Image (spheres, rainbow, N blue to C red):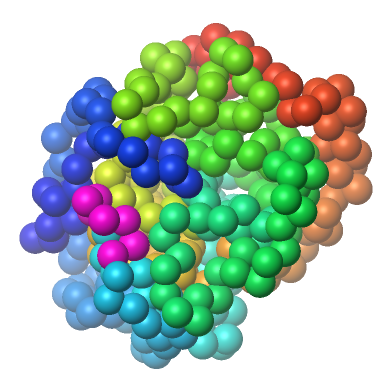
Amino acid sequence: SSSWWNTRPVQVMTEVMPESPVDPVAPPAPIEVERVERVGGAADPEMVRWHGMVGASAGWAPPRVVARTEADARPGYAAYDASEYLDDPEVLQAKVKLLAEMWLRGGRDTVVYTGAGLSTASGIGDYASKAGGSIAPHKKGTSTGSRLELQPTVAHHALAAIEEKGLIGNWVQQNHDRLAQKAGFPQAKLNEIHGAWGDTKNMVKMMDDTLRSDLLEWLVAWSARARLCVTLGTSLCGMTSDEIPRAAAERFALAEGDGLVIIGLQRTFYDEAASLRIWGLCDDVMKLLAKELRLKVPDPKVQRRGEEWVRSHPRLTYNTPVRSARDPM
């Protein structure tokens, strides 16, 4: 059996600033993943690692290394080195087509789980992009220097458009930047689990802080409901909020839902438990997905909603109200 769950430490952190770990609520004990029943036979573990369980038998070429390093992506956490990988264009297109089919099946029972890699194209740096020659977008030096002036990425706009189509039930956001709201994603479906800029009721969490209990309850409720979890730009290195992708992967092993999709450049400890593994930049993948779903990105209506949010919340000020497990379900 796989070791992906047995080696993951249970810790809480921001996606940008590493500090010392705390002791959050422990997730439930994992189950054994019976892959053979879901993929129609024994799959090559190496192909599962590169493509996920449903893609392992597709005959796709492994991703290519575009930036190699031996440096740990997240020292002290459940993470591999910070080398970066990309799928070949034809493989990426095939995977995105499969993702679109999975997402349409998941519908409003789909949860999005995002980390620092989602926002690097806006100019925000991350902690894990350490390889020389890294292709992470922020390495190009596009930041405005002001967090208040940061603009949503293509991926942010695509996610907001997908929600407008009725295909996202909840977005668990590890970042603090409020780019989701700027893109027009509804606040009512956004769980800023690690805190946010401009929020005095849900301030940015450091490593010795605890998660807000109501937001954790909301997250756990969605971890029990999600038929599909799509992760973008997160290292999945052992945060309490990783319960969302873990639960989706476990249910897939029991023939429930479409499981876990991982989108990113670096290897994670969850790769071999993923239904589908996509190696690419968040913006590139989401641009292809929007085309596959026949969505206009940005969606004009959604974009106007985001602009109104910015006007109504100067300096990103918004205090997250108390949430419950039913809000919204």
Give how far across and how far down residue 11 sits, in percent. Answer: 27, 36
Q: Is residue 252 among what the camera can see? A: no
- Residue pictured at 64% horizontal, 39% vertical: 177
- Residue pictured at 36% horizontal, 69% vertical: 82
Residue 117 placement, left or right of 296: left
Give the residue furthest to the left.
Answer: 1
Residue 83 placement: quadrant: bottom left
In the image, residue 167 above or below residue 295: above
Q: Main secondary structure of the magenta part?
A: loop
Give the magenta range. 72-78
Give the residue furthest to the top.
Answer: 322
In the image, residue 27 above or below residue 32: above
Q: Quadrant of the N terminus?
A: bottom left
Is residue 77 on the magenta stretch?
yes
In the image, residue 205 above or below residue 96: above
Q: Quadrant of the C terminus?
A: top right
Q: How many marks?
A: 0
Residue 269 placement: quadrant: bottom left
Residue 140 placement, left or right of 259: right
- Residue pictured at 25% horizontal, 28% vertical: 22
Give how far across and how far down residue 310 sits, in percent. Answer: 83, 32
Residue 59 placement, left or right of 66: left
Q: Is residue 263 among what the camera can see? A: yes
Is residue 228 on the magenta stretch?
no
Residue 155 placement: quadrant: bottom right
- Residue pictured at 86% horizontal, 22% vertical: 312
Give how far across and how far down residue 52 sits, in percent. Answer: 34, 68
Give how far across and how far down residue 323 sits, in percent. Answer: 53, 13
